[in-house]
Image (spheres, grey):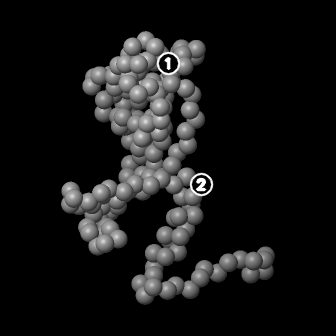
Amino acid sequence: MQHSNGTTGPTDPGDTEDGWQPTPEHPWRPVAADDSGNPYQFDEGAPWCVDRASHPQFNGGYPSLNHHRTECRSYDGFYGALSEDGQPGYFSAYLMRPFRFGQLGQTADQTRLAIEFEPAEDDGEPFRCTVHTSSIRNLAAYLTHTADVDDGWRPPRHMQHSLTD
């Protein structure tokens, strides 16, 4: 079954072959780091993760409960913003990569840039999208190019077309 966080697995955790079930103290399936024949992943997490000290290799072979349950996250930038309809909220951007400790299969995940908007009031819906890391430089160049605009127009950047420009 495909879950909403992108993971796959049985509908009920107790439906696994060995009957393992997550508990509040052990939400991830225990996996030995040196068991190469095990079908479950020993994910060491991303080196840039804000919760790196909670990764299993630094925490006795099992992730700390301080770690986000489904992903590694970097430090985030957090800014006051307005939604499309003018409601106040917060905009944040951070790197993320799924944290697959104890999950079935060997999935190679890619790091992505997560962009989130969370309304200041509880009645609004939060919004999140992710962008492949290959697009970060293009996004940064676009934001840099438009950062000085105060009247809605800025002349285009000079583009070098030959060696003599």
Q: Which residue is mark 2?
A: 134
Vertical side of 79 occupied by 18: above or below: above
Quarter residue 55 falls in: top left
Query: Percent from the top left, x then y, of residue 63?
Result: 38, 26
Q: Secondary structure at mark 1?
A: loop
Q: Mark 2 packing: few (<14 Cα in 10 Å), some, or many (20+)?
A: few
Question: For the residue marked with disc 1, what is the amino acid?
Answer: Ala
Query: Percent from the top left, x then y, of residue 81?
Result: 31, 67
The C terminus lies in quadrant:
bottom right
In this view, the residue in front, 164 or 19, is: 19
Q: Residue at x 53, y 64 (%)?
A: 139
The circle on residue 33 is 1
Query: Percent from the top left, x then y, of residue 20?
Result: 38, 16
Vertical side of 139 occupied by 9: above or below: above
Marks 1 and 2 in Cβ contact (< 8 Å): no
Q: Residue furthest top?
A: 18
